[in-house]
Amino acid sequence: MNQINKDYQRLPGSYLFAEVKRRQAAYEAANPDKDVIRLGVGDVTLPLAPAVIEALHKAVDEQANADTFKGYAPDHGYDFLREAIQKNEFAARGADISVDEIVISDGAKSDSSNIQEIFGPDIKIAVGDPVYPVYVDSNIMAGRGGDYNEETGKWSDLVYLSATAENDFKPSLPTEHVDLVYLCYPNNPTGTTLNTADLQEWVDWANANDAILIFDSAYESFITEDDVPHSIFELPGARTCAIEIRSFSKRAGFTGLRLGATIIPKEVEIDGVSLLDMWKRRISTKFNGAPYIVQRAGEATYTEEGKAQLEENIAYYRRNATLIREGLEEAGFEVFGGINAPYVWMKTPNGMDSWDFFDYLLETVQIVGTPGVGFGPSGAGYFRLTAFNTYEKTAEAIERIKGLKAQNA
Ligand SMILES: Cc1ncc(COP(=O)(O)O)c(C=O)c1O
């Protein structure tokens, strides 16, 4: 008899952003005259940089000519892109990473959900709480969750590393045995980050405890403070315990183009087996490479012109983040993040439930954010706003929220 993968059925409810979109669509359908401002889903809004567009056009033209046509890309990415990443993201920051340790992909969501496949079924996994839901759900689908407790919002076999205002959003090191830890800094959803000393503690702990760190640095281009590492490989000891996942989505606006990379140093091993070799093996079997034209577009983000254009776009979003953070603070809310990340994390007023606050903001001032509890139990009583709308819409949203606060004062 045929069978489905029952672990898929164990996932509770719908995916967070699907539920946000569903509630928003229902509200808009019932209130077609209302102007809803979206500060919810973390998708970019600015068009691609001119240097990227130029590279795309050029690569498309190459596809029209038999002499320059490209079919399947090399399994692990074109060297021109891997070299540009190695030089700009690692060598330039003093991180010792070689080109053959960089594996190109179609984005950080695929890599961060697929990486668990190269680990055994019974390993112990720790995640930040709140967390980017993909790390948890991909492990549930692989049967590693145990039982879900609706009351606590936790899976029995996962270790939750709570990050709240009480510990300054810096989760404590695990006190029980853990094999794999997902770290995301700058963090989605809290917009907070770890400084070099904090991250060094994780690296030292992982080396001392035979654990591996998956470091998702999708938001590194938003870092403004000097003492915040852009890559975990800037830190001594990381080459023996860390895997880093990179994305072009937020850095270069490639959410629609799709491009990312996973970096695994040769020294990262379990029982003498190289995880880099295993990951390459997986990629060769299950992926046929990111498109040539997209990899050329990725390369263009590292030209001097490209870098300057990207920086302008990031500065635009940063200005929005500052506007949100300062506006909400002025209105008397407790606010976190938004300095090294495009996310601002706020406490809901009077301890209001996160989904109730979502509905309240949507219905009273037509603003869509993301309920903190959707990212894990420690997100209860928090709410996330993103900097990815236009400056004008962001300013309008903050004025509306300020008005709301004044009304209730
Ligand atoms: C922490 C984190 N990792 C990865 C991703 C997905 O990145 P990509 O678009 O490269 O798949 C996101 C997207 O929001 C994210 O927040």
Image (cartoon, rainbow, N blue to C red):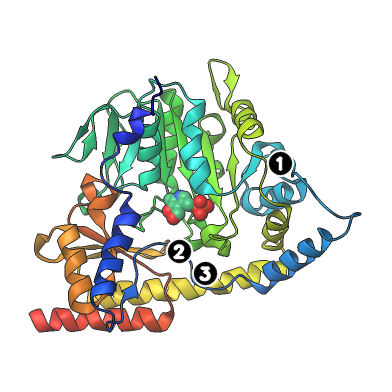
Q: Is mark 1 on a helix, strand or loop?
A: helix
Tell me which amino acid carries mark 1: Val
What label sits on residue 99 in the rendered view?
1
What label sits on residue 303 in the rendered view?
none
Mark 1–mark 3 Cα distance, whole angstroms, equals 26 Å
Which residue matches tag 2? Answer: 43
Question: Residue shown at 19%/58% (left/top)?
Answer: 354
Question: In the image shown, does 107 or 170 lie closer to the viewer?
Answer: 107
Question: Residue shown at 43%/76% (left/top)?
Answer: 319
Quarter holding residue 148: top left
What label sits on residue 314 in the rendered view?
3
Q: Is residue 407 above or below residue 9?
A: below
Beta carbon at label 2 within 8 Å of ligand 1: yes
Tell me which amino acid carries mark 2: Asp
Mark 1–mark 2 Cα distance, whole angstroms, equals 29 Å
Question: Residue shown at 24%/82% (left/top)?
Answer: 400
